[in-house]
């Protein structure tokens, strides 16, 4: 626990925004460092990016170059060439999943930097010539050569919706959860990492929220649609606190760091005009989920309907949600319903009123098209489907029982979805709205955990582990 408090004090929660990235050309984060038998070892790719250096590599050799300075090494040798001089490394490089891991100190010194290892704090300060302040990185003990890719280690990646430009963004041991992306392409990510909860990708010293509560995860994170300096999220505590709800909805200012609790609930959705927030919660002594709404400041809380997973249409006129028949989430029937929120038909509900048993339209993830006319959703064990918002014109666009969590991308031209390929791995795929041109987006050696679409609709952020 001292490790977390020490790091928190070192970082000191600076609440300033990082510079926008250019066209999703996001710089990798400076990595966590491995203490490999007394030698600090680090992956080269993110360090080269932070330095602004070029890098070339293959299965046998690596070269990093910045101006006249150059670091070269071989995969199976302690011999390195640094700025024209032969140097013996303290250990030979490791190559794991195509990434070179080399001794940190000679790599940093090659480009006029230096390091200071704080053994007691289990951290290292890295001083680089292109940065005023040192980068403070965690040092983790080595257990075996594959510790960095243990079974629980997930990393963050970005890729184009056509599968191009795959890039790893994090080299940390905090197991990042899927981030969200602002229109200026700044990424925010939450981590199950002690007391550090919410930070900017590629700038880990910039914390946007920290708390003394032991938090398990952020089930939901949303930017306010008209004010991206405001974040709405739900927080799940590590342990239940007597008399306190297990999941709370909080509103965070990304400029001041101040946050306040609005209600207890999850499965958040914000109306397009930013005035209304919907969420899912349960009444006392009931297993039937209900959708509630409130003003964005937490006032005027009210029940909308029985159901869960509410989603606004792009114009805010409709609310799409999942409705259960029977005993809450354990019922044998559920369906998608659409409630009209505005206009002459306000209050009208479009739903399946048939009596078909064991019929499940599983809506754990669903979405509207950009024009609000089409809904994309998944039927449990029966692929990805589309329908018009008024529950007409049903079309099946994939036929695998393992397809789930669809989203729209590329200005509504592609449907992105997960396909469960084994018990512990998902593949990431896309298909057009007619069910044609099925494409695998992410290589098979990456088991995808979760994903989100960037605001431009052309890139996918996802977390995955190597297999």
Image (cartoon, rainbow, N blue to C red):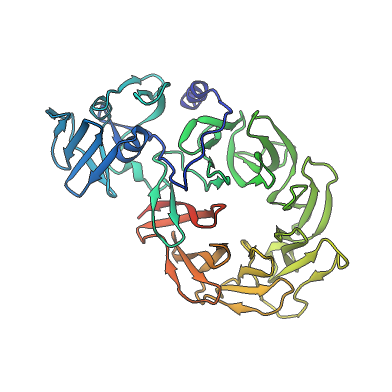
Q: Residue at x 55, y 68 (%)?
A: 413
Comparing 304 with 216, the one in front is 304
In the image, taking residue 138 as reference, residue 279 lies left or right, namely right
User: Toward the viewer: 63 or 118?
Assistant: 63
Residue 381 in the image, given as x and y percentages of width and height: 56, 73
Taking 359 as reference, is 338 above or below it?
A: above
Q: Which residue corresponds to the image point at 21% horizontal and 49% vertical from the top-left?
A: 58
- Residue projecting furthest to the right: 344
Q: Is residue 44 visible?
A: yes
Total numbered labels: 0
x, y percent for residue 132 = 42, 21
Judge left or right: residue 397 versus residue 240.
left
Q: Position of residue 278 (x, y in %)?
A: 75, 52
In the rendered image, the quadrant that contains the C terminus is bottom left
At x 39%, y 54%, the residue is 165
Q: Residue 422: image x %, image y %?
A: 42, 65
Compared to residue 57, the image places residue 50 above or below, namely above
């Amino acid at each position: 626990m001292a490790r977390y408090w020490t790091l928190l004090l070192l970082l000191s929660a600076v609440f300033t925004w990082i510079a926008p990235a250019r066209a999703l050309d996001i710089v990798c984060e400076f990595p966590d460092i491995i203490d490999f038998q007394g030698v600090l070892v680090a992956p080269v790719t993110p360090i080269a990016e932070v330095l602004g250096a070029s890098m070339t590599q293959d299965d046998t050799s690596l070269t990093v170059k910045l101006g006249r300075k150059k670091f070269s090494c071989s995969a199976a040798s302690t011999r390195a060439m640094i700025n024209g001089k032969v140097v013996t490394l303290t250990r030979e490089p490791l190559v794991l999943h195509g990434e070179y891991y080399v001794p940190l100190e000679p790599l940093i010194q090659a480009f006029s930097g230096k390091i200071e290892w704080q053994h007691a704090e289990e951290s290292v300060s890295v001083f680089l010539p292109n940065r005023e302040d040192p980068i403070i990185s965690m040092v983790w003990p080595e257990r075996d050569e594959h510790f960095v890719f243990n079974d629980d280690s997930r990393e963050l990646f970005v890729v184009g919706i056509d599968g191009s430009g795959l890039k790893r963004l994090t080299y940390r041991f905090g197991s990042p959860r899927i981030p969200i992306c602002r229109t200026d392409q700044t990424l925010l990510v939450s981590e199950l990492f002690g007391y550090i909860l919410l930070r900017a990708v590629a700038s880990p010293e910039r914390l946007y929220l920290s708390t003394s509560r032991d938090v398990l995860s952020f089930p939901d994170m949303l930017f306010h649609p008209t004010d991206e300096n405001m974040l709405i999220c739900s927080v799940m505590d590590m342990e239940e606190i007597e008399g306190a709800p297990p999941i709370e909805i909080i509103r965070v200012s990304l400029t001041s760091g101040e946050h306040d609790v609005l209600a207890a609930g999850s499965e958040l959705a914000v109306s397009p005009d930013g005035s209304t927030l919907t969420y899912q919660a349960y009444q006392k002594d009931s297993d039937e989920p209900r959708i509630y709404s409130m003003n964005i400041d937490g006032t005027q809380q009210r029940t909308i309907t029985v159901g869960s997973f509410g989603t606004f249409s792009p114009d805010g006129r409709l609310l799409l949600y999942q409705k259960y028949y029977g005993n809450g989430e354990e019922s044998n029937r559920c369906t998608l319903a659409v409630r009209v929120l505005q206009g002459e038909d306000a209050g009208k509900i479009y739903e399946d009123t048939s009596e078909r048993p064991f019929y499940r339209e599983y809506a754990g993830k669903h979405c509207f098209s950009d024009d609000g006319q089409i809904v994309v959703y998944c039927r449990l064990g029966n692929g990805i489907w589309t329908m018009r918002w008024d529950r007409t014109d049903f079309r099946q666009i994939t036929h695998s029982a393992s397809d789930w969590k669809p989203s729209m991308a590329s200005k509504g031209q592609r449907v992105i979805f997960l396909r469960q390929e084994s018990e512990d791995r998902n593949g990431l795929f896309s298909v057009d709205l007619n069910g044609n041109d099925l494409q695998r987006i992410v290589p098979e050696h990456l088991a995808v955990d979760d994903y989100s679409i960037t605001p431009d609709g052309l890139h996918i952020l996802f977390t995955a582990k190597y297999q």
